[in-house]
Image (cartoon, rainbow, N blue to C red):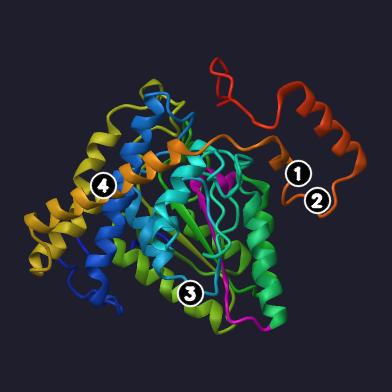
Amino acid sequence: MSTTDMLQIISESGKAVRGSKLRHLEGRFVEIYEHMLRTRLLDERMINLQRQGRIGFYVPSTGEEAAQIGSALAAGERDWLYPSYRMPGSIVARGAPLSDMIANCFGNEADLCMGRQMPVHYAFKDQHIVSISSPIGTHIIQAAGTAMAQKMKGDEGISWVFFGDGGTSSNDFHSGLNFAGVWKAPVVFVCTNNQWAISVPFEKQTASESVAIKGQAYGIPGVRVDGNDVLAVYQACSEAAERARKGDGPTLVELMTYRRGPHSSSDDPTRYRGNQADEWMTRDPILRFRKYLELQDLWSEDQEQELTERVKAEINAAITEAEKAPQPALDTMFTDVYEKVPPHLREQYENLVEQEGTGHEPDPDAAFPL
């Protein structure tokens, strides 16, 4: 397969593509669908919370669920993941609790980051998910370095890094792929090409035929995949992971999908694009996989209703719990940062306590920076 061909296992009609080979996922089809629907429902609920003013910011990923779930399930337990900020499905598929994800969006005392991170910039040590960065592309070289350390240590795990098409325009993309290609670092580079880098369309970022073809310049194989086909995503990413584990080096995987919603809750995509999102509705990854399951007699309308109601109840319960949690106390600015707080910072903290107390009440008139 060339770097401009596109791997597909399930067609848009939900039928298996003739001649396609399916890897070992048959027993997990329902689990995969549940992850995809849970991601979609979480996105919808969190955007509503932002519009209601109950959280300050959110990054939706509607339409990209297959790219997230398929790639995350291909990763091993000992692997380290460097995700981008539009990947709640990957976090869900790795087993991170919904309650912790939602608490992060509130930035309260229940948040594992204690309000220090941006909303949707998760960090889950137990799931081997490295803290997400807002600057585009910086984590690409970090993942390459982690992979090289794993290789030197003889670690069984590999590293994964996920970025959008906009990230391929960063210097870090070049540096990360070049380093990994030279040293055969066991890392999988996954580009979710959703066609837009905020308001910049893909064709204005590069003259290359694809992202996958860029791997050739670094001696890295590239593969282009239908990013709305969860089984194709899993297959391509699994093969890339196997290659890395065998010591054959990195792979660049391009997942073709579409950002149906805004870049973030602060963005208005109607200002820079037309009705492309409507065209991609027919390629919806969740509807496609549901059709496939129904044709295999693995899914029904009753199951759909039961799952939808159950997941909505889970999300609502987590939101209710998160809203009860207080804001992080002032001393959390130092907690987990210093083993022994320097005297000058301790003095500043004590002065602050004298002025404001030990709590931290939010300013209701403060505007979110993005």
Task: Answer with mark 2 or mark 4, whichever residue precedes in sequence.
Answer: 4
Q: CA distance from mark 1 to mark 4?
A: 36 Å
Instruction: Determine which residue is flagged by label 1.
Output: 334
Task: Answer with mark 1 or mark 4, whichever residue precedes in sequence.
Answer: 4
Q: Residue at x 72, y 23 (%)?
A: 356
**Element under disc 2:** loop
Judged by depth in the image, the label closer to the viewer, 3 or 2, is 2
Q: Are marks 2 and 4 in contact (CB under 8 Å)?
A: no
In the image, the segment drawn in magenta is 154-169
Q: Looking at the image, is 312 positioned above or below residue 174?
A: above
Instruction: Determine which residue is flagged by label 2.
Output: 338
Task: Answer with mark 4 or mark 3, whichever residue precedes in sequence.
Answer: 3
Say what amino acid the circle numbered 3 marks: Gly
Say what amino acid the circle numbered 4 marks: Ala
**Element under disc 3:** loop
Q: Residue at x 26, y 45 (%)?
A: 312
Q: Is residue 165 magenta?
A: yes
Judged by depth in the image, the label closer to the viewer, 4 or 3, is 4
Q: Are marks 1 and 2 in contact (CB under 8 Å)?
A: yes
